[in-house]
Image (spheres, helix red, strand yellow):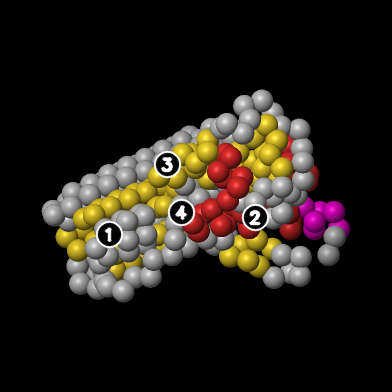
Amino acid sequence: MKFPQPIPVRELAQWLNARQVIGNDTLFASGINEIHKVEPGDIAFSDVKKYFEKTLRSAATVILLNEPAECPPGKVILVVENPFEAYDSLVRAHRPFEPLTVPVSHLSDIHPTAIIEPGVVIAANVTIGAHCYIQANTYIGEYTVIGDHVTIGPNSIIGSDAFYFKKLADGSYQKWRSGGRVVIEDHVDIGAGCTINKGVSGDTVIGAGSKLDCQIHVGHGAVIGKNCLLAAQVGIGGKTIIEDNVVLYGQVGVAQAIRIGKGAMVSAKAGVSKSLDGGKAYFGIPADEAREKYKELAALRQLPELLKKLGKP
């Protein structure tokens, strides 16, 4: 999530009631992001000491911590009472909740050639490009960006909140304000009954030319490449990256925060629990290269006969 204008670190420290500023306090914060998506100028945070080093070595420029630490060159640390609360309050301040009271927000930007069927709800700060076709009863959430020649099937939900909660000391969960977006590039087709979550503070992206069947779920911050094919009931975990020209057949489940390489093909009902190389075919639970899986299945078929030979019951 980028701020409308860069914020001076000194101003930021005052607004967050920072107990201490370590490093270069003349810097500016241009945005806020999760650790896996931070860019130079971004704010990141950590409230667990064992993760301090990872956060400090990330691309983030401004780091919110709850204890002092050695600051790398070119960065600044703001020591605050509760880094999570500070981070979340910044997102809420720059992405304030705006309840929708009309079907189509007057703050949305819809190209005159777009077709919007009855029952579609469009929230504030949505952009819809030329020659799009949004079918009946679909919901387009705040800050969603839809390119040109995009079709979205009926009853789909684009830009729902990220499924992202912080576990508290008492075992309960605290919801984060989702400050990210959904970005749908040109010539994308999305089927009926799909749900695509926006990122926590970064973007969920559907690449140009990709085609999604019905009843597909895409988790927060996931990035789907160009010209991918996703068949019905595929589920993709948050923060996962799917490179260009990947095919996922029906009911494939993909875990969070992994990568599937360019041109991979995953057969129906497979469970992808780890990153997969591109240009190969996979199936099974857990998903593995098809050739190896077939060898395993062939060996299993011989197991009863082998046990008989060994005198096993």
Res 197 → quadrant: bottom left
State the extent of the magenta-drawn residues as a range.
306-311
According to the image, label 3 marks what residue? 5
* Pointer 4 residue: 94
Crowding at dot 1, Cα within 10 Å, few <14 / some 14-19 / many 20+, comes out as: some
For mark 2, does the 10 Å Cα neighbourhood hold few (<14), some (14 to 19), or many (20 or more) residues?
some
How crowded is the residue under tag 3: few (<14 C-alpha within 10 Å), some, or many (20+)?
few
The image's mark for residue 107 is 1
| Amino acid identity at mark 3 | Gln
The question of residue 308 being in magenta is answered with yes
Q: Are marks 4 and 2 in contact (CB under 8 Å)?
A: no
Q: Residue at x 71, y 65 (%)?
A: 168
Mark closer to the chain start, 4 or 2 = 2
For residue 82, say whether it is visible. Answer: yes
Q: Which residue is mark 2?
A: 84
- State the residue at coordinates (37%, 43%): 207
Q: Residue 295 at x, y = what percent?
A: 63, 44
> What is the chief secondary structure element of the magenta stretch?
helix
User: In x, y percent, where is residue 234?
Assistant: 46, 58
Q: Is residue 98 left or right of residue 253?
A: left
Q: Determine if the magenta segment contains residue 165.
A: no
Tell which residue pokes out farthest to the right in this image. Answer: 311
